[in-house]
Amino acid sequence: MDRIINTINTYISLSEQEIEYLKDAITKKEYHKNEIIFSEGKIANEIYFVNKGCVRLFYNVDGKDKTAFFYSAEQYICAGESYTYNIPAAENYQAISQTEIFILTKSKIEKLLKQVPKMEVIARIATENELITCQKLIACFITKSPEERYLDLLNTQRELFQQVPQQYIASYLGVSPETLSRIKKRVYHKSLS
C-alpha cells in the first residue's frame, strides 16, 4: 500500500485516519501473465493502480489486437470514457507479466469521497493520466517515424523489452514484427558507428 499512498501524498497529504479509509476502500488483486483485467463492451466502474508488473492497453480491430499503450508500476488506469459516461468501453487491459493491481470501485470511491472529500484527486489523476496517455500517443504518431518511436520507447521504458512480447511492441509502434526487427538492426548498427 505504501506505493499508492506515496503517489497520492505527492498531490495531497493524508492523515492516519484518512489512510485507513483509503485502505478500506482498496481491493488488491493479482493477475497472471496474459490474464485479461478488463474487456471491451463492459461498462467501467473501476479505477486501477498498477503496484507491480505491466499492463497492456489494446483494441480489437477487425479481429486483431492493436496495442495502444503499456502501463507499469505507479500508474493509474481507467477506461475514462466508459467510466465517465457509463457507456461500453472500446478498450481492453491485459497483464503482460505477473501483475498486482489495487482496485477502487465507483461505489467505494463515492463512500471514500464522503469520508475524505479531498480524495477526489484519485479520480482526477486517473482521468488526467488517461488523457495524457492519449495525447502522447497521438503526438508520437503524428510527429515521429517508427524508428524514432522505437528509440523513445527504448529510452523511456527499456524494461518493457524484457517483459513484453515482440509482437505487442511492434503493434504499439504501428509496424509489423518483421519491420521492428529491421528497425532494431538499424539502431544497433548505428550505435556501433
Image (tube, helix red, strand yellow):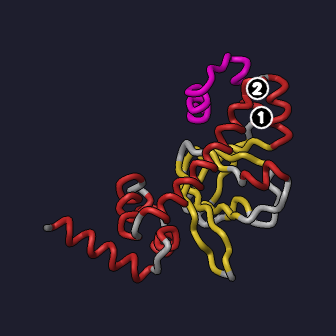
Q: Is residue 171 above or below residue 102?
A: below
- The numbered dot on residue 25 is 1
Q: Secondary structure at mark 1?
A: helix
Q: Is residue 173 rendered to the left or right of residue 99? A: left
Q: Is residue 30 above or below residue 166?
A: above
| Residue shown at 50% from the left, 73% from the top | 174
Going by the numbered disc 1, the residue's amino acid type is Ala
Mark 2 — residue?
21
Quarter placement of the N terminus:
top right
The reply to whether discs 2 and 1 touch (Cβ–Cβ < 8 Å) is yes
Between residues 108 and 188, which one lies in front from this camera angle? 188
How many numbered discs, if any? Answer: 2
Which of the 4 image quadrants contains residue 57?
bottom right
Disc 2: CA contacts within 10 A as few (<14), some (14-19) or many (>=20)? some
Q: Is residue 192 rendered to the left or right of residue 30? A: left
Q: Which residues are magenta?
A: 1-21
Q: Secondary structure at mark 2?
A: helix
